[in-house]
Amino acid sequence: MNKLKLKPKIELFWWRICKNALPFNTFLVNRRLSNFPGCPRGCGVDEDNCHLVGNYFKIQNVVSLVNSLGFSIPIFNGFLDCLECLQRLVGKNSLSANILCTAVYLVWKSRCKVVHGDKDDSDNTISTNAISFAVRSNFLNIQPDNWDANQQLLLFPWHPPPPGWIKINVDAALKRNNLAGIGSILEVKTQQAWL
């Protein structure tokens, strides 16, 4: 899981799945905290890690939406199939593996919303968020030294670009009368001076 560059909370989530430490309904029944082992969305099967990554209609819908955007993420029969596939994807197609792990995490979060009486996230929302989160964690952490100096966290004040980098800032505005304006600044910092 470390090689997939997952966000820390998603990596912890997958660690919990592997250790059977998520509060699936089967887990709650085994602990005598519940009487219902089935899926809360009415799938008609017991809810466990195999169900979450395999034959769960919600994850199948999300994966098919992601695949319709040009990715190639398989649908699994069970949890062990999923883990074997993730091992094969590491290094070869880490982005697809990251998207899958993120999608399973977001489907779980949506499931928890349903259980606690909140509104369920749509399949489109989950699939687009999975792609967005995975791309951010997969590519923005490749060179963390450079990105930290280049405003990865937007809550901090502006920093000049690292030497040898070009920074482009763009801003636009639209008034109520449909007058528009756009401005940009190109900044280059060489070893000795600003250009």
Image: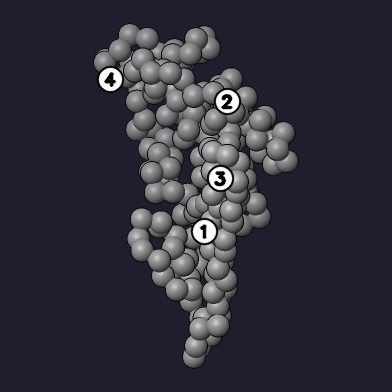
* Amino acid at the residue labelled 1: Leu
Q: Which of 127 and 170 is in front in this view?
A: 170
Q: Earlier in the sequence, mark 2 or mark 1?
A: 2
* Amino acid at the residue labelled 3: Leu
Residue 57 screen position, x and y as percent:
59, 20
Q: Callout 4 environment at 10 Å: few (<14), some (14 to 19), or many (20+)?
A: few
Residue 49 screen position, x and y as percent:
47, 28
Residue 188 screen position, x and y as percent:
55, 78
Nearer the observer: mark 1 or 4; the answer is: 1
* Amino acid at the residue labelled 2: Asp
Give the CA distance from mark 3 to mark 1. Answer: 30 Å
Q: Earlier in the sequence, mark 3 or mark 1?
A: 1
Q: Which of marks 3 and 2 is nearer the N terminus?
A: 2
Element assignment for label 4: loop
Element assignment for label 1: loop
Tag 2–tag 1 contact (CB < 8 Å):
no
Element assignment for label 3: strand
Q: Name the residue under label 2.
A: 123
Residue at 36% of width from left, 63% of height from top? 157
Q: Mark 1 points at which residue?
A: 140
Nearer the observer: mark 3 or 1; the answer is: 3
Q: Name the residue under label 3.
A: 174
Nearer the observer: mark 3 or 4; the answer is: 3
Element assignment for label 2: helix
